[in-house]
Amino acid sequence: MGIEAQFQKVEEKLYQNRYLVDAGQPHIKIAPHEKPSKNLLAMTHLCPAGCYTEAESGQVEIAADGCLECGTCRVLCEETGEITWNYPRGGYGILFKFG
Amino acid sequence: MIDEKFDAIVIGAGMAGNAAAYTMASRGLKVLQLERGEYPGSKNVQGGILYADMVEKIIPEFRNEAPLERHLIEQRFWLMSDTAHTGMHYRNDDFNEEKGNRYTIIRSQFDRWFSQQARAKGVILLCETTAVELIQDAYGKVVGVRTDRSGGPIHADVVVLAEGVNGLLGTRAELRPRPQASQVALAVKEMHFLPAEVIEQRFNIKGDEGVVIEAAGTISKGMAGMGFIYTNKESISVGLGCLVSDFADNQTSPAQLLDLFKKHPSVAPLIAGSEVKEYAAHLIPEGGYKAIPKLFGPGYVICGDAAQLNNAVHREGSNLAMTSGRIAGEAIYQIKSRRDPFTAENLALYKKMLDDSFVIKDLKKYKDMPELLHTQASNLFLTYPQLVAKAMENFVRVDGTPKIEKEKTTFSSFRKSRGALGLLGDAMRFARAWR
């Protein structure tokens, strides 16, 4: 079984969720960098919402629309200043139906 | 926005925040509660099991009204290899009692209900309001908060930080450290919907009876972690969590790990044909006693997950959260009714009361457990489960091999994997941490 068939795409998982996206105001930002740290690079695997991706040029990018606000990246990458982590504005972001 | 001054501001409408707000308002205090979600519970995630005793101490008649899913009559522990589980099942009809002991709940529903009770006692709740900063006076005393709503700061005599494991206010004000990667687990969870009758057939239950399965072993790929399966009325919560530091070291995708858990031959039939309606992720405090920050200071107290009050060994968290919130509320009420100021000296009463409760006593008992589980992860979560599965197979598979040889194979497999001294050491370390 290929890896594609074995695992459901994270986007498909997120599709079931309810969000109110604060367009143009991402609550997580990555600082400009030449080469990502080990932890930042690890986020491309670790982020449960698949928000982090590695660009062809080697930098790590984020699209935070599907963020589940777990805080894993904050724990791993905020201290070094590689990312800034805020809550979305009140009422925005993930809205758990069940939680 | 709000010119009046409050007796207390509570940050967050989860278990700790709602317990604190309810306790204070029902004693006549003027309480403002801030919640960043659309409604209480919309940002909260739990497995989730509710422990009745701790709710009863706040709202004795909660069973009549609270949205509860199933009362638990059976607990299964599964030690898993890739193809097997070796289980211990504990089922007791005595749990079919008038006042149930443990219930499965759905947090968004329970939190909404809990918050309604607090508001009925007079709590003023502002939803869709993110508290962004604590306001401190020249002496460092917390005197209020700033929010992302228009208008100025809001002032209060005391602020209850019930902002959850990932709370920003306390860390930004340097009242508590940001959790370390080795002190938090990342859990992912899906809600699998099935008709109630199907759930009851598959789990051998009837009516509102429920089952909990907690599973450890090769499902976490050698990382310190656990899987869980909880029966709700018409859904099954399926999830898995591992330490963030282990996830980072192993570069593992939690979503894929959850998919593998769901595909395990012992799990797949339980959730077959279900409709998944939500996928959630959340951090769980796992640092135990040694990771508890300073719980109080001038003008503030810290409760629940924000204070790392979570018993990882017993999978208890929400009950520690709501108990800490209740106790904080009681301590604040006592100080207020004496007309004393909310200095650190006076708020030390919260810590003293919490120390005397099961919350700190339980966490103290297991103070060495996190280190043990975290440094021994690959043995405890990978080697031993595989050995146990092999031993069980040796025991039950009939293939003409004399039993004495089978036993020898089993014993030597244990010795080979960990060595006689390793086995003894593991047992001693575990016993010591448990004591």
Image: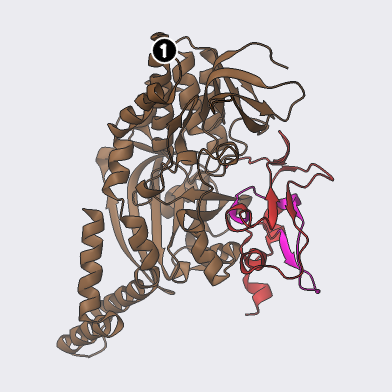
Chain colours: A red, B brown
Residue A56 position, x and y percent, is: 80, 74
> Does residue B78 sit above or below B324 in this rendering?
below
Residue drawn at 45 percent across, 37 percent down: B304
Is residue B63 something one can see in this rendering?
no
- For the view shown, which residue lies furthest in the left direction? B404
Q: Secondary structure at mark 1?
A: loop
Is residue A67 left or right of B7 when viewed as pictured?
right
Residue A74, position as x, y percentages in the image: 62, 52
How many other residues sit within 10 Å of disc 1, few (<14), some (14-19) or many (≥20)? few
Q: Residue at x 39, y 54 (%)?
A: B213
Is any part of residue B277 visible from this angle? yes
Q: Is residue B238 above or below residue B84?
A: above
> Taking B18 as reference, is B94 left or right?
left
Q: B318 above or below A38?
A: above
Outermost right residue: A24
Q: Name the residue that disc number 1 marks.
A: B340
Name the image quarter holding residue B63.
top left
Residue A63 within the segment the image draws in magenta: yes
Q: Is residue B389 left or right of residue B412?
A: right
Q: Residue at x 48, y 43 (%)?
A: B232
Residues drawn in magenta: A51-73
Q: Magenta stretch: residue B172 in it?
A: no
Nearer-the-camera pick, B247 or B291: B291
Give whichever of B148, B66 is nearer the camera.
Answer: B148
Three-letter amino acid code of the residue under disc 1: Asp
**Picture quadrant where residue B174 is located:** top right
In this rendered view, identify the residue nearer to me: B118 or B78: B118
Q: Chain of mark 1?
A: B
Corner quadrant of residue B55:
top left
Q: Is residue A74 left or right of residue B196?
A: right
Q: Position of residue B282 (x, y in %)?
A: 56, 49
